[in-house]
Image (spheres, grey):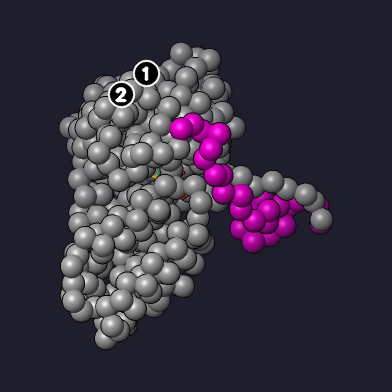
Amino acid sequence: MASRTLPPTIEWRDGDLLLLDQTRLPHEIVVENIADVQAVWRAIRELRVRGAPAIGVAAAYGLCIAMRASTALPIAQFRAELVRHAEYLETARPTAVNLSWGVRRMLRHSRDIDASDAATLYAALVDEATRIHEEDRALCEGIGEYGMPLITEGCGVLTHCNAGALATTGLGTATAPIYAAHRAGIAFRVYADETRPLLQGARLTAFELQQAGVDVTLIIDSAAASIMSQGLVDVVIVGTDRVAANGDFANKIGTLGLAIAAHHYGIPFYVACPSSTLDLQTPGGARIEIEERNAEEVTHLAGRRIAPEAMKARNPAFDVTPHALVSGFITERGIVRAPFERSLRSLFAAEGNAA
Ligand code: MRU
């Protein structure tokens, strides 16, 4: 993990699930020992654990938490309970496909296990969640390796939200090429959008890159186009919550505007996408469900009202960027370029979210 002084984003320790509370960062470091499946659901919903890959790993362990006190149940009842908890966990947030990917992979694995007792099946679930966790780290490494050549000596990189180490259990996705280039001794600078309204860029990306010694400058979201117009950005790298079969993708609100501005200024625009975030069953961006969050996140700042009383507000947490604005997807198997429908399918047809 790049943020060396921090505890891991997610840890499974002797049957307990420990989550680093990302709503308290960077000023407080609080690790929560998750008591039950409702607490997992709330931690995901309330963004204490957030970022698509981290949500997938947390949900996989979340199912283990859901089932850990049920190992004395008859096996059929254990299996029925598992399905019930899986359906519940999937409702925590709608946009990041990693949530349903993680939960469904756990269910598939449970069906493949021919266990005669619940304790055996529970142990198999813990093994599978641990594999999902380990694979997540490896996906980040792969994205770092393939994305690193996009970052050259003296260049400027712009990123949005936090697709960093905190959003995964490894080097991050959008930040993996950044960490790889930094390790390789390349000198470059990063602009981190603050990311209204919940400030994942200011609180998390700026923090973890600074901790790692990367040259990072925080900007307000609405400064991004201006910074691009000054020739300070050579490449934009963002993360994603879901990539549809045609290459349209959802990411934190504000990403679409960045892609349009990058296109205007002729700046390459890359999306870091582990295979766990690919959704080949969704044909295009119009079918991606966008989470609409509480209006108070817009009308209030740090708990204090800034908008007039009774002000109407919209708070879509994500937007969809059309594939035409994407230069390429940085995946763990290489950079995927247009035509995306064909190239994504040919590389990832066998993965869990494929049709
Ligand atoms: O609402 P969040 O903080 O979960 O949104 C996170 C993002 O939009 C990230 O860019 C995305 O999940 C990719 S994380 C590697």
Q: Residue at x 30, y 84 (%)?
A: 73
Observer-nearest residue: 195 or 5?
Answer: 195
- Name the image quarter holding the C terminus: top left
Whether residue 266 can be seen here: yes
Specify the quadrant of the image occupied by residue 184: top left
Q: Which residue is mark 2?
A: 343
Please provide the residue range marked out in magenta.
283-309
Observer-nearest residue: 306 or 298?
Answer: 298
Q: Residue at x 26, y 27 (%)?
A: 346
* Residue 12 in picture, x, y percent from top left: 25, 68
Q: Amino acid at mark 2?
A: Ser
Q: Which residue is mark 1?
A: 339
Q: Amino acid at mark 1?
A: Pro
Q: Alpha-carbon distance for marks 2 and 1? A: 6 Å
CA neighbours of label 2 inside 10 A, class few (<14), some (14 to 19), many (20+):
some
* Residue 236 in picture, x, y percent from top left: 41, 27
Whether residue 29 can be seen here: no
Would you say the residues marked 2 and 1 are in contact, meaning their CB atoms lie under 8 Å apart? yes
Observer-nearest residue: 280 or 267?
Answer: 280
Q: Is residue 128 magenta?
A: no
